[in-house]
Amino acid sequence: MLDWRNRKWYILPRVENGDLQGRRGATFARFRLWQQAGVGVQGRADWLFVKIHTHGCDEANAKILLGEPMREFHRKLSRHAAKHPGFKYYYVTAHEMAMLVHQAEQGASEPTLS
């Protein structure tokens, strides 16, 4: 997605790719872009997949990943889910996400994590 709120040279939009590092922490504005990307499985438009990532254990990213900005992001996500009963989210590994994709492909009505 193009992030028009975060411009390069105040002109060009930056590309939103779900990276969490440096000054690019998880925010609800970024979450909206991740949702708008609409990554999913054909035939299951109601199942969206968002993958966020960081590169290694760079100590410079500790505040972004473990500090108050991340805690605030999770609080906002929780409040959003409480306001929208149809919105559910899961924290999963890459393998678990692949299993969820297969469930969606097979027509499961609800995700099952085991």
Image (spheres, rainbow, N blue to C red):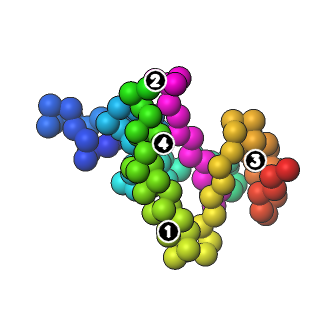
The answer to which quarter of the image holds residue 73 is bottom left
x, y percentage for residue 5?
Answer: 25, 47
Above or below, 34 relative to 10: below
Q: Is residue 43 one of those drawn in magenta?
A: no
**Left or right of 42 in this view: 100:** right
Instruction: Work out whether mark 4 precedes mark 3 in sequence or the reverse, and give the earlier one.
Output: 4
The reply to whether the C-beta atoms of the residues labelled 4 and 1 are less than 8 Å apart is no
Above or below, 7 relative to 100: above
Q: Which residue is drawn at 52% across and 76% down?
A: 83
Q: Distance of mark 3 from mark 1, alpha carbons?
A: 22 Å
x, y percentage for residue 31?
Answer: 44, 52
The reply to whether the C-beta atoms of the residues labelled 4 and 3 are less than 8 Å apart is no
Residue sitting nearer the eye, 16 or 71: 71
Which residue was labeled with disc 1? 80
Instruction: Work out whether mark 1 precedes mark 2 in sequence or the reverse, and give the earlier one.
Output: 2
Which residue was labeled with disc 2? 58
- Amino acid type of the residue tagged 2 in the rendering: Asp
Instruction: Work out whether mark 3 precedes mark 2 in sequence or the reverse, and give the earlier one.
Output: 2
**Magenta segment, which residues?**
46-58
**Left or right of 86 in this view: 20:** left
Which residue was labeled with disc 4? 66
Give the quarter of the figure containing the N terminus. Answer: top left
Which residue was labeled with disc 3? 100
Q: Residue at x 42, y 57 (%)?
A: 72
Q: Distance of mark 4 from mark 1, alpha carbons?
A: 21 Å
Residue sitting nearer the eye, 31 or 76: 76
Of helix, strand and loop, which mostly describes the magenta segment? loop
Other-residue count near label 1 (Cα within 10 Å), few / some / many at <14 / 14–19 / ≥20: some
